[in-house]
């Protein structure tokens, strides 16, 4: 029988869920896929963008036998369908890791008819946006989704999730809190609170920064400065809906104090 939190998700509008998924950051969408499969009993990891070789998420399970799945995540708009060439290309991912049982392409859009035939022929699993919403509604607790979607838009009673008023409610799932940091200045550029940024990480990600004042998360990314094998530099990017902010803006929003 569904829990009370899960029943809340079952009342959400499917179109609203898909709409919000399409508005997430690419990195955040990959993290959501990892967290969903983690909740389903897999051990998952998100591959850093500069070293992913086309593999966005790796999922492993040792029971009842060793299994390994590779994911390619496509956060596409509704009319941007995944075609057969993409399926053929990502089928090659199984040769980049040892012991791969399946390759899965997940999109917030859909697949062309030819892509579906190619997926069947090559044994590549295809999950459309509708398929992903089915999994979310059937399997995911609201506490997991609240890290990625604006749950307040879906609440029917005006009451927040159980535990949302506790001190830890702003923290991502499995977040290991580290020390406070002033790496980008004294103040959070989103809410302006002083000395509120804390370093840490979750089980599935590179290091994160998180503001204890407003709950904004920043993910570390390596960005190529040139094509192919060019040099890279590090950027911390705020993730989540309406949270697009790059490192270069922090200095402007954190003037040096006298």
Image: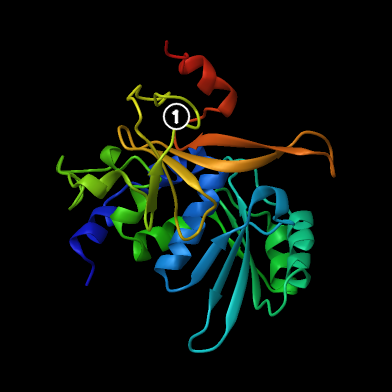
Residue at 71 percent across and 48 percent down: it is 50
Measured along the vertical axis of the image, is residue 232 above or below residue 187?
below
SS state under label 1: loop
Residue at 32 percent across and 37 percent down: it is 212
Residue at 43 percent across and 23 percent down: it is 189
Residue closest to the far front? 258
* Image position, residue 2 (x, y; %): 23, 67
Residue 169 or residue 209, whichever sits in front:
209
Residue 85 or residue 185, whichever sits in front:
185
Specify whether 239 is left or right of 226: left
Q: Is residue 130 visible?
A: no
Specify whether 244 is left or right of 39: right
The total number of labels drawn is: 1
Q: Quadrant of residue 221?
A: top right
Q: Where, quadrant-wise, is the C terminus in this rendering? A: top left
* Image position, residue 217 (x, y; %): 43, 39
Within-10-Å neighbours for mark 1: few <14, some 14–19, many 20+: few
Residue closest to the far top? 258
* Image position, residue 246 (x, y; %): 56, 28
Residue 37 or residue 131, whichever sits in front:
37
Q: Where, quadrant-wise, is the N terminus in this rendering? A: bottom left
Residue 12 or residue 30, whichever sits in front:
30
Q: Quadrant of residue 195?
A: top left
Q: Which residue lies under the disc numbered 1?
A: 242
Q: Is residue 66 visible?
A: yes
* Image position, residue 55 (x, y; %): 68, 59
Q: How is the image coloured?
A: rainbow
Residue at 14 percent across and 43 percent down: it is 157
């Amino acid at each position: 029988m569904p829990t009370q939190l899960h029943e809340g998700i079952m009342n959400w509008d499917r179109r609203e869920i898909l709409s919000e998924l399409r508005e997430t950051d690419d990195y955040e969408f990959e993290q959501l896929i990892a967290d969903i499969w983690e909740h389903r009993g897999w051990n998952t990891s998100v591959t850093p963008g500069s070293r992913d070789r086309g593999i966005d998420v790796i999922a492993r399970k040792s029971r009842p036998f060793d299994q390994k799945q590779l994911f390619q995540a496509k956060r596409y708009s509704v009319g941007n369908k995944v075609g057969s060439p993409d399926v053929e290309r990502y089928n090659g991912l199984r040769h980049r890791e040892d012991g791969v049982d399946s390759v899965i392409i997940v999109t917030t859009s859909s697949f062309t008819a030819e892509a579906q035939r190619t997926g069947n022929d090559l044994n590549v699993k295809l999950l459309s946006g509708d398929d992903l919403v089915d999994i979310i509604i059937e399997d995911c607790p609201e506490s997991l989704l609240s890290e990625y979607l604006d749950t307040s838009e879906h609440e029917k009673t005006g009451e927040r999730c159980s535990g949302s008023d506790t001190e830890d409610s702003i923290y991502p799932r499995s977040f290991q809190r580290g020390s406070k940091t002033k790496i980008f200045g004294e103040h959070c550029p989103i809410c302006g609170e002083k000395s509120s940024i804390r370093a840490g990480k979750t089980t599935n990600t590179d290091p994160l920064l998180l503001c204890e004042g407003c709950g904004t998360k920043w993910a570390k990314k390596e960005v190529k400065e040139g094509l192919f094998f060019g040099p890279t530099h590090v950027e911390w990017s705020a993730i989540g809906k309406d949270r697009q902010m790059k490192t270069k803006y922090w200095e402007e929003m954190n003037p040096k104090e006298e």
